[in-house]
Amino acid sequence: MTLQDKVAIVTGASRGIGRAIALGLAAQGARVVVAARTEVDTSRGTTFETYASGTIHATAQLIQQRGGTAIGASCDVTQVEDIRRLVATTLERFGCIDVLVNNAGIDCESPLIDLDIDLLDRCLAVNVRGPLLLCKFALPSMMAQRSGSIFCITSGAARGYRPGRVGYSMSKAALERMFLSLAE
């Protein structure tokens, strides 16, 4: 299988799993829209921060240095206008969307009685609402071209529980149910 000249949007692609997905898609020939909030690297140089650091521009540049095509696109998936702009920018730049990878995600680790409600709301907005809205805005283009693939990055936490992660587990279970419903 080749992804030569296919267009892929990857959210949460400034670092970690999202960066690896973006690099992998580009290595197979896809033109990648590297989407995340992170435009400025604020890491302080520890081992963890080095692993977890990165920006949309650094990921796009790494793809370009390896001979691929990529652009960085700032997007906070909790903001409807950012999502609309991401889809519009992709369509203006590349003319289509062939692959959408909903990777952006956050945790809200806390025992329920100590759970910060604002953090829970943000977790649900990033992990569930954001992917739903990305699908809503990307699907018309995919339906018009009669092709496309949409992925979500979930977690074993959707089907199992670790102490103090009820909010995160709930968000990933909702994400899985949502994608099963969308597939139907």
Image: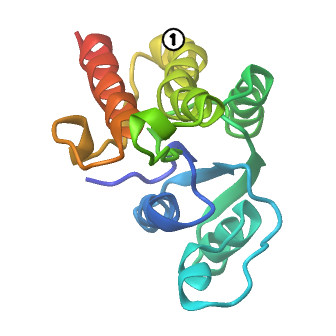
Image quadrant where residue 2 sits: bottom left
- The image's colouring method is rainbow
Could one spot residue 60 in this view of the protein?
yes
What is the x, y in percent for residue 80? 73, 20
In-front residue for pair 180/118: 118
Residue 56 relative to residue 119: left or right: right
Q: Residue at x 44, y 68 (%)?
A: 27
Reading the image, the residue beneath label 1 is 144
Could one spot residue 99 in this view of the protein?
no
What is the x, y in percent for residue 145? 48, 18
Quadrant for the C terminus, please.
top left
Q: Against 124, is 66 above or below?
A: below
Image quadrant where residue 140 sits: top right
Q: Report the residue that reaches farthest toward the left.
A: 160
Residue type beneath disc 1: Ala
Q: Residue at x 34, y 17 (%)?
A: 178
What is the x, y in percent for residue 117? 60, 28
What is the x, y in percent for residue 30? 49, 54
Q: Against 146, is 100 above or below?
A: below
Image quadrant where residue 166 sits: top left
